[in-house]
Image: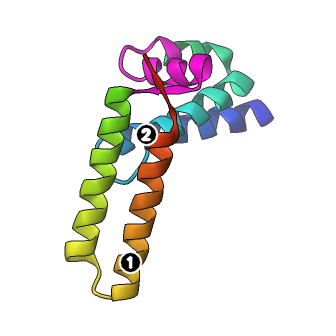
Amino acid sequence: MHRKAYVGLGHVCVALGVVGAFVPIMPSVDFLIVAAACYAKGNPALRRKLLAHPKLGPPIRDWEEHRAVSRPGKLIGIAMVTVGIAASITWGVEATWLRVLLAAIWAGVVVLLLSLKTKR
């Protein structure tokens, strides 16, 4: 029963990770890392398949092996979160306090991304 739950959660995280690759603000690699961990407990063959994927596998392996993010990964992450939050501030919310909160979240995410080790 637990193995099926891990596999199910892994599938959900892979789906969210793929969606996150196209939606600003939503993370993608974070969900893929969780998916790999779920697959490791539920179905190691699925984990191997995910890590072998030509597009999805490299960022997961970089994180697992080096605890690092590639420079393009950081830049894309910063760009996506900037676009998403700028659009939300410009067109999505009217309350000043909410705009300030979104700007603070943006700053926190950018600082976090910049503080992660960069894979050479």
Residue at image location 43% in from the left, 39% down from the top: 28
Part of the protein shown in magenta:
51-70
Q: Is residue 24 visible?
A: no
Q: Toward the viewer: 48 or 94?
A: 94
Q: Is residue 15 magenta?
A: no
- Residue 65's place in the image compared with 79, above or below, is above
Residue 35's spot in the image, x, y percent?
58, 33
Q: Toward the viewer: 79 or 33?
A: 79
Residue 8's spot in the image, x, y percent?
62, 37
- Give SS at disc 1: helix
Residue at image location 37% in from the left, 54% down from the top: 25
Spot the residue most to the right: 1
Res. 90 mark? none
Spot the residue most to the bottom: 95
Residue 16's spot in the image, x, y percent?
45, 44
Mark 1 → mark 2, Cα distance in angstroms: 25 Å
**Horizontal placement of 33 versus 118: left or right?**
right
Mark 2 burial class by Cα count in 10 Å: few <14, some 14-19, many 20+: many
> According to the image, label 1 marks what residue?
100
Q: Toward the viewer: 91 or 78?
A: 78
* Marks 1, 2: nearer the viewer: 1
- Give SS at disc 2: loop
Query: Mark 1 is on which residue type?
Result: Val
Mark 1 burial class by Cα count in 10 Å: few <14, some 14-19, many 20+: few
Nearest to N terminus: mark 1 or mark 2: 2
Residue 19's spot in the image, x, y percent?
36, 43
Residue at image location 62% in from the left, 40% down from the top: 9
> According to the image, label 2 marks what residue?
28
Query: Mark 2 is on which residue type?
Result: Ser
